[in-house]
Image (cartoon, rainbow, N blue to C red):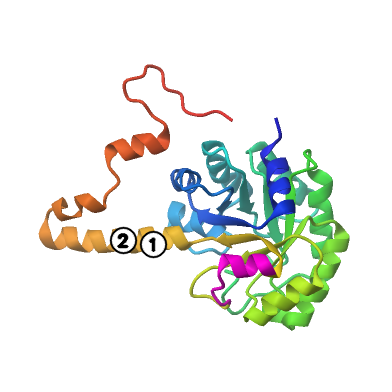
Amino acid sequence: MKSKAARLRELISKRAVMMPGVPNASMARQVEQAGFDAVYVSGAGMINSTAGMPDIGLLNRDEVARLAGYVAHSVRIPAIVDADTGFGEGDEVGRTIRALENAGLAGCHIEDQEFPKRCGHLAGKTIVDLKTMIARIKAAVAARGNKDFIIIARTDARAVEGFDGAVKRARKYVEAGADGIFPEALQTADEFRDFAKEIDLPLMANMTEFGKSPSLPFQELAELGYKMVIFPQSAFRVSMKTSEEFLRALKKSGTQKVWLDKMQTREELYHLLEYDPTAENWAGRHD
């Protein structure tokens, strides 16, 4: 049987893949249930939902591997995770790759920001020198046990060195052995188009909301040549907005009855979790 990483490589070799982002395994199951071919584990989603903290590199390697591993093992589709700056340099990057592989992930992206990183769509980012990022990529590639594990190099250089600087860095990251390139926070549709013309490697596009990038339809990005399109916080934002509205209504009315038709039922949850309460010794899925 092909590994999830091999299946994802095969998918992106043929066509573009839409990857909704999730903060946890239950939402990942919803992604799979909706018919998507892959899922993205959002770094911001993990820290926002787990610790109630901002996306500034506060989770360590073990925490990310554990949380992302729950996602990877909860679904049959491949999962890619945000690995921030690699959680160190040199051998530490290698340890990160091995931890994510062991956790069942199909791939990850590592960025060229300095630690502690900032959200890719905020001002004030700083990036490491080219030599440091190339070393990160090479360490990641050398460390993987499964040659199909996908290592994507993310560059945040657009905000620091301009569009041309981002392209120059991406070319070097290709030479260093990255399997894909993720240009973060491109600012116009033309930039997405022009970047794709310059880089001959599978590209990842981030369609996050309320950031620097325009919201482009999946099909348009696919036609431009992007092979992976992520929506890292979309489902999380919808769920948070809805729960906020519910809690305000509950505080005011003292009852949840008018919200019942908007709730996932117990039966629907059990179906999602593949749980039969009448069965004995339910142990869940083990991939």
Labels 2 & 1 near each other (Cβ < 8 A): yes
Judging by the rendered image, the residue that carries numbered circle 1 is: 238
- Per the rendered image, the range of residues in magenta is 213-223
Q: Mark 2: which secondary structure?
A: helix
Q: Nearer the viewer, residue 51 or 218?
A: 218
CA distance for labels 2 and 1: 6 Å
Amino acid found under the numbered disc labelled 1: Val
Residue at image point 54% right, 49% down: 36
Q: Is residue 129 visible?
A: no
Q: Quadrant of the C terminus?
A: top right
Corner quadrant of residue 200: bottom right
Q: Nearer the viewer, residue 19 or 134?
A: 19
For residue 285, above or below residue 183: above
Residue at image point 58% right, 42% down: 77
Query: x%, y% of residue 3?
Result: 70, 36
Label 2 CA crowd tier, 10 Å (few <14, some 14–19, many 20+)? few
Q: Is residue 192 visible?
A: yes
